[in-house]
Amino acid sequence: MKTRSINFLIIVVVFLIYGCRGARTPRASENFDQFYDRFLTDSSFQMSRIHFPLPGINTAAMEASDEEDSIYYWSKDEWIMLKKPQLDSSMYERKITVTDTLAIDEIFMENAGFYFKTVYEPIRKKWHLVYMVDSNM
């Protein structure tokens, strides 16, 4: 009987180890820079890499609404294609951070209330836009 309990315990431990191993954060198999260049220039590709409704913050729409929502959702029918920004580096700052599991592009104007952020994560090993902030205060 003791051997049976030990065998059962070993099986449970193996399943727990295997289950935790499979729960790791997914990593993208595609290069982010190549993805991002295509994402900002190909509208069909861009639409295929956004899961709508896209959560985030849209201060203009949220202030115009009577509701006290803390998250805004962009819908597919109201989407305006994101394009490569043409920034005056003397006015705007841009910070892009990329890891294997997350990419963040931030554009802001210091002390001016302008902040734009897009967040990308790998889904099924391909980069997708998962969150966006469009803040003008």
Image (spheres, helix red, strand yellow):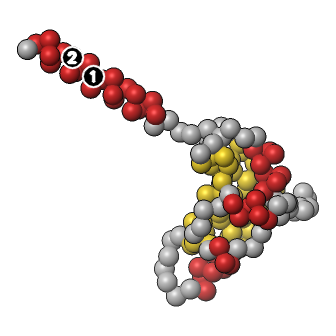
Left or right: residue 12 compared with residue 92 = left
Is the Cβ of the residue at disc 1 closer than 8 Å to that at disc 2?
yes
Which amino acid, mark 2? Asn
> x, y percentage for residue 121?
62, 49
Q: Position of residue 43 (x, y in %)?
A: 79, 65
Q: Quadrant of residue 131?
A: bottom right
Residue 27 or 15: which is nearer the viewer? 15
Q: Give coordinates of residue 4: x percent, y percent.
A: 14, 16
What SS does tag 2 mark?
helix
Give percent across and percent down for residue 92.
84, 60
The count of marks equals: 2
How far separated are the C-alphas under marks 1 and 2? 6 Å
Q: Amino acid at mark 1?
A: Ile
Q: Nearer the viewer, residue 27 or 57?
A: 27
Residue where numbered disc 1 is placed? 11
Residue at screen point 76% across, 59% down: 45
Secondary structure under tag 1 reads: helix
Q: Which residue is mark 2?
A: 7
Residue 55 visible, this orientation: yes
Badge 2 crowding class, 10 Å Cα cut-off, few under 14, some 14 to 19, many 20 or more, is: few
Q: Quadrant of residue 79?
A: bottom right
Q: Nearer the viewer, residue 116 or 47?
A: 47
Taking the spot 74% from the left edge, 68% from the top edge, the residue there is 114
> Residue at the location (45% across, 37% down)?
23
Q: Which of the image's four quarters has the C terminus?
A: bottom right
